[in-house]
Image: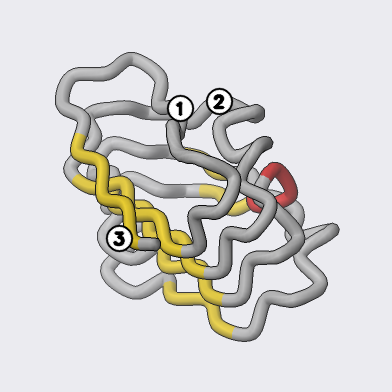
Amino acid sequence: MILTRKIVNASHAKATADSSTEHFKMENLRTTSIDSDAFTDLNELKYLQIHCPLLTEIFPAFFPSSLVILDLSGNFELTAIRSFQGLVNLQELEICSNRSL
């Protein structure tokens, strides 16, 4: 299942999808943070793409352990990527086009 969600002018971003979602995209978000429980129920998530030009910090430890590919490219204001603890299946991390990293 592929689910794409585009949110504009959200103060905080939270993912909404059913638990069988494997591919999730968050694009063009006007937010600086993502709630720690945003991906709690996405137990089968394999691919996560987050493109939020204003996002400043991200905590991958909040993502499901099922994640295989994490695309954080294009988050121009991103200055910190915190702990990857728990992402035991992660095979690919994309962080290009982040000015501050």
50 to the left or right of 90: left
Alpha carbon separation for disc pair 1 and 2 = 6 Å
39 to the left or right of 9: right
| Residue pointed to by mark 2 | 35
Alpha carbon separation for disc pair 2 and 3 = 23 Å
Question: In terms of image quadrants, where is residue 41?
Answer: top right
81 to the left or right of 54: right
Residue most toward the top?
11
Q: Earlier in the sequence, mark 2 or mark 3?
A: 2
Q: Residue at x 64, y 29 (%)?
A: 36
Dividing the image into 4 quarters, which one contains the N terminus? bottom left
| Residue pointed to by mark 1 | 14
Question: How many residues crowd mark 3 within 10 Å: few (<14), some (14–19), many (20+)?
Answer: few
| Residue pointed to by mark 3 | 99
Question: How many residues crowd mark 1 within 10 Å: few (<14), some (14–19), many (20+)?
Answer: some
**SS at circle 3:** loop
Dividing the image into 4 quarters, which one contains the C terminus? bottom left
Question: How many residues crowd mark 2 within 10 Å: few (<14), some (14–19), many (20+)?
Answer: few
39 to the left or right of 7: right
Residue 52 position (above or below residue 32): below
Residue 98 position (above or below residue 9): below
Alpha carbon separation for disc pair 1 and 3 = 24 Å
**SS at circle 2:** loop
What amino acid is at disc 3? Arg
Q: Residue at x 70, y 43 (%)?
A: 62
Question: In terms of image quadrants, where is residue 85?
Answer: bottom right
Please identify, in this view, whether the residue under mark 1 or under mark 2 is nearer the observer: 1
